[in-house]
Amino acid sequence: MANLTDRQFYELCRAHPDVKFERTPGGYLLIIPPTGGETGNRNVEVGADRVIWNRQTKLGVVFDSSTCFRLPSGGDRAPNLAWVTRPCWEALPPDL
């Protein structure tokens, strides 16, 4: 599927919450398969370390792989783990 609009992408994600979708800058849909056991374990270990560090430092906000980000270069991606500095997070508009 090519050239999904922002609205079409949003509606598709809402209609299929159990599927992980991403979108390229050109609007092409990507369906992301689930990870295997080794990768899933590594992701949660790294995520737990990041959350503990962030709770101690209070320097930012941590997100898991279910959070989709619109990138400045275009496209929508959901990384395994994301961390955003507090000033950058507070500068963003609220979810629509």
Image (cartoon, rainbow, N blue to C red):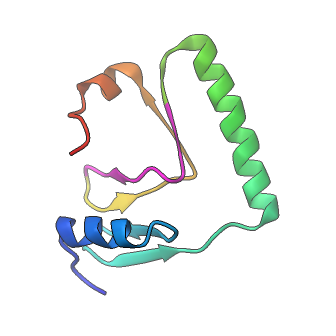
The structure residue drawn at horizontal position 57% and vertical position 12%, both measured from the top left corner, is 57
> Dividing the image into 4 quarters, which one contains the C terminus?
top left
Q: Which residues are magenta?
A: 62-72
**Does the stretch in magenta take in 69?**
yes
Residue 50, x across and y down, in percent: 64, 30
Q: Residue furthest right?
A: 38
Q: Residue furthest bottom?
A: 1
- Whether residue 80 is situated above or below residue 83 in the rendered picture: below
**Of 73 and 56, which appears nearest the observer?**
56
Count of number-bearing discs: 0
Compared across the picture, whether 57 is left or right of 37 comes to left
Quadrant location of residue 88? Answer: top left
> Dividing the image into 4 quarters, which one contains the N terminus?
bottom left
The structure residue drawn at horizontal position 70% and vertical position 34%, both measured from the top left corner, is 48
Quadrant location of residue 54? Answer: top right
- Whether residue 24 is situated above or below residue 46 in the rendered picture: below
**Does the stretch in magenta take in 66?**
yes
Residue 47, x across and y down, in percent: 66, 39
Quadrant location of residue 51? Answer: top right
Q: Residue furthest top?
A: 57
Compared across the picture, whether 85 is left or right of 81 comes to left
The structure residue drawn at horizontal position 26% and vertical position 55%, both measured from the top left corner, is 73
- Whether residue 50 is situated above or below residue 56 in the rendered picture: below
Residue 68, x across and y down, in percent: 40, 53
Residue 52, x across and y down, in percent: 68, 23
The structure residue drawn at horizontal position 18% and vertical position 71%, both measured from the top left corner, is 5
**Of 26 and 54, which appears nearest the observer?**
54
